[in-house]
Amino acid sequence: MRQMIRNTFLMLVLGSPLGVLADLPGEITLPQDSTSYQANDLPGYPLVLKNCLTCHSSQYVQTQPPGSPRTYWNATVHKMQQAFKAPIPDEEIPAIVDYLTKTYGAEK
Ligand code: HEC
């Protein structure tokens, strides 16, 4: 019963804005989602989507000092894994660091 009430509530909350959008004429362009990671062809891109959105958005990455070097990103990813217990496979770290350095850091 509780579950049903909760589901109904979620449907109302989530359903109504979409319902409103569907009624509007023409095409709607939503603003780009600034809380996800920047898409590109680097192998690390799908890995950050998989490993780096479970605890926080990409906001933390976007607000790091511009031009942060590879060593900084490497230390940060290891900190996520070691200090905050993010389940990031060791073998995926180099590609993630490469993506972060080239997309947000010194090798932009
Ligand atoms: C297990 C949860 C968790 C995961 C998964 C995680 N983080 Fe974090 N991250 C944190 C916490 C906790 C903080 C510190 C928040 C604070 O200080 O308020 C943080 C902070 C950060 C910061 C801010 C700078 C710093 O050193 O504190 C960056 C950049 C960052 N994370 C990047 C990443 C990246 C890149 C990934 C994927 C490789 C990732 N995080 C995955 C928990 C996580």
Image: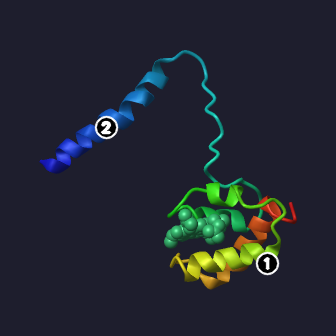
User: Is 16 left or right of 64, judged from the image as shown?
Assistant: left
Which is nearer the eye, 81 or 98?
A: 81
Amino acid at the residue labelled 1: Thr
Mark earlier in primary sequence (2, 1): 2
Q: Residue furthest right?
A: 107
Q: Where's ligand 1: which quadrant?
A: bottom right
In this figure, which colouring scheme has been used for the structure? rainbow
Local SS, label 2:
helix
Query: In screen coordinates, is 19 left or right of 56?
Result: left
The vertical placement of 63 against 20, above or below, is below
Q: Note whether 1 is above or below 94 in the view shown.
A: above
- Residue 40 pos. (x, y %): 76, 56
> Splitting the image into 4 quarters, where does residue 4 fall?
top left
Residue 71 figure quarter: bottom right
Residue under pointer 2:
11
Quarter residue 99 falls in:
bottom right
- Residue drawn at (81%, 74%), measured in percent from left and top? 70
Q: Which residue is mark 1?
A: 71
- Tally of numbered discs: 2
Q: CA distance from mark 2 to mark 1?
A: 46 Å
Residue 12: x %, y % from top left: 30, 33
- Along the viewing direction, whichever of 33 and 42 lies nearer the viewer: 33
Label 1 beta carbon less than 8 Å to ligand 1: no
Which residue: 48% across, 24% down? 21
Position above or below: 32 against 17: below
